Amino acid sequence: MFKNLATPVLCLALLGSILLAIGLGPAAVPPAGTARLLGAAVFGGTIRADEVPLYEIVWQLRTPRVLLAALVGAGLAAVGVAVQALVRNPLADPFVLGVSSGASVGAVAVLVTGSLAALGVHALSVGAFLGALAATALVGLVARGGSPLRLVLTGIALAYAFQAGMALLVYLVPQGESTATVLFWSLGGFGGATWESLPVVAVVVVAGAVVLWRNARDLDVLALGDETAVGSGVDVRVLRRRLFVLTSVMTGAMVAVSGAIGFVGLIVPHLVRMVAGASHSAVLVIAPLVGALLAVWVDLLARTVVAPRELPIGVVTALVGVPVFLALVRRRGYVFGGT
């Protein structure tokens, strides 16, 4: 019942937030004007000559950025729900398995060595995605056949190794601009969003979220423990391996276009479980919508609060996420993970 009511409300709130976020900025546009410019872009309408610069800002710069924020926020929330069930750890988030750190190494390697230069503006994203896939393969190989705890510990240990490798690369090639880019990218941001970068991440996030939702029952059982899952007819090893690969690919695709954005995948699942319960069929519908809403508004704050400069998204999510998480810790009666 709650899911049936919350879903349309959150969808409307998300559409309204996207419209507002596209219009807000140094060159503010009222919602009606934003809708008219978007309509002209999508349906081929006409605009006045003096509106062309504003049209370019709305359509070419802000719209892909806001849509990317919504996609990444939704994906991080969905992956956070799945990973917390996968490793049976309520403190897990999409980056606990070392995928983000592997992506960082790939991106930094591209920045400091100039490799993949033939790919132009897409070199950084491709390098990050390749690094994420390499990290996924390495973590899976080392933790193969082990328990969820081994998977988590392997991911954490290798994440430290990847971070050390990233620091070493930056240290060996001390270029001020590259170092600043690495720092900003490692804290996350949607400033590099383009229409060309949206389709791939959209397909990966939407398809991945659908697959996770279709496995909601198995996630319910898996969250209760391996013995319960086996008793319910679930092949735990096959399911865990499949979910590990899926969540890693989703995380890698998102990190490749936005950098590492913390707290969304950690906080949103808990907030949703507080009001929707622990059933993954409900949580995996509501959490992506909440994550998308959060990312859209966090991105708006990041690019407007100190304009014309821009804050890294990770800074804003930490400022929002830490107090929320501490409030959850202090809240009586709340059991992390919902079980």
Image (cartoon, rainbow, N blue to C red):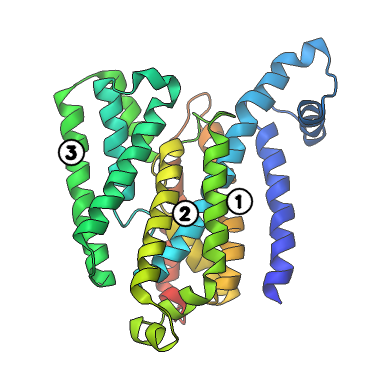
Judging by the rendered image, the residue that carries numbered circle 3 is 165
Packing grade of label 3 (10 A; few <14, some 14-19, many >=20) is: some
Q: Residue at x 24, y 19 (%)?
A: 175
Secondary structure state at the residue bearing disc 3: helix
User: In which quadrant is the C terminus drawn?
Assistant: bottom left
Judging by the rendered image, the residue that carries numbered circle 2 is 264
Q: Residue at x 41, y 72 (%)?
A: 330
Packing grade of label 2 (10 A; few <14, some 14-19, many >=20) is: many
Judging by the rendered image, the residue that carries numbered circle 1 is 293
Mark 3 or mark 2, which is nearer to you? 3
110 shown above or below 211: above
Question: Which badge, 2 or 1, is on the more N-terminal residue?
Answer: 2
Q: Position of residue 250 (x, y in %)?
A: 45, 50
Q: Residue at x 33, y 23 (%)?
A: 116
Residue 37 sits in quarter? top right
- Structural distance between the alpha carbons of marks 3 and 2: 26 Å
Q: Position of residue 333 (x, y in %)?
A: 46, 82
Report whether 118 appears left or right of 290.
left
Callout 1 amino acid: Leu
41 shown above or below 261: above
Mark 1 or mark 3, which is nearer to you? 3
